[in-house]
Amino acid sequence: MKAILNFEAVWLLAIFVYVLTYVTGVFRISSSKIGPTEIRAIAVLANTIIYFVGNPKIEFLFGTYTLYSLIVFGVAIMLFFLFITNIMHEARNLLQAEEKGKT
């Protein structure tokens, strides 16, 4: 489930980049100073932690999850947050550009 959530977050960011490139003519793959390299660094760090610490199961009221699942879920939430903030920021920029063009 968390892998699907992470995939959806990455897919939404990719679609956002495609649409923004079409609208503005500028291809920018990084989002809020987080790009593919930073995501890879997080993955390497997570795998390193799991290698040395192990992948313990953590009990919650709503189920049992592994440490790696929680890390992946945290990355997915971060990507969704970046998606929402980038949409709001770019919408504001495009609105301001449109209003400048009308005057």
Image: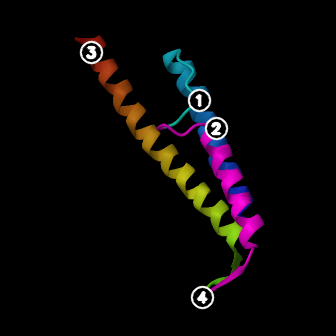
Q: Is residue 77 above or below residue 56?
A: above
- Identify the mark nearer the N-term, 4 or 3: 4
Could you say where residue 9 lies in the image, as x and y percent from the top left?
62, 49
Residue at the (55%, 33%) spot, across then down: 30
Magenta-highlighted residues: 32-60
Residue 37 sits above or below residue 59 on the image = above
Q: Nearer the viewer, residue 94 or 58?
A: 58
> Residue, x 64% and y 37% (percent of image)?
36
Tell me residue 88's x, y (percent): 40, 40
Q: Residues within 10 Å of mark 1 (few under 14, many from 20)?
A: some
Residue of label 4: 61
- Asked if residue 90 lies in the magenta stretch, the reply is no
Pair 4/3: label in front: 4
Q: Residue at x 33, y 19 (%)?
A: 97
Image location of residue 66, percent across then percent down? 72, 74
Question: Which residue matches tag 1?
Answer: 29
As measured in the structure, the alpha-carbon distance from the residue carrying label 4 to the one carrying label 2 is 35 Å
**Mark-to-mark CA distance, 1 and 2:** 11 Å
Closer to the camera, 59 or 11?
59
Report the residue at 65% width, 46% height from top: 41
User: Which badge, 4 or 1, comes first in the chain's sequence?
Assistant: 1
Q: Which residue is mark 2?
A: 37
- Residue at label 3? 100
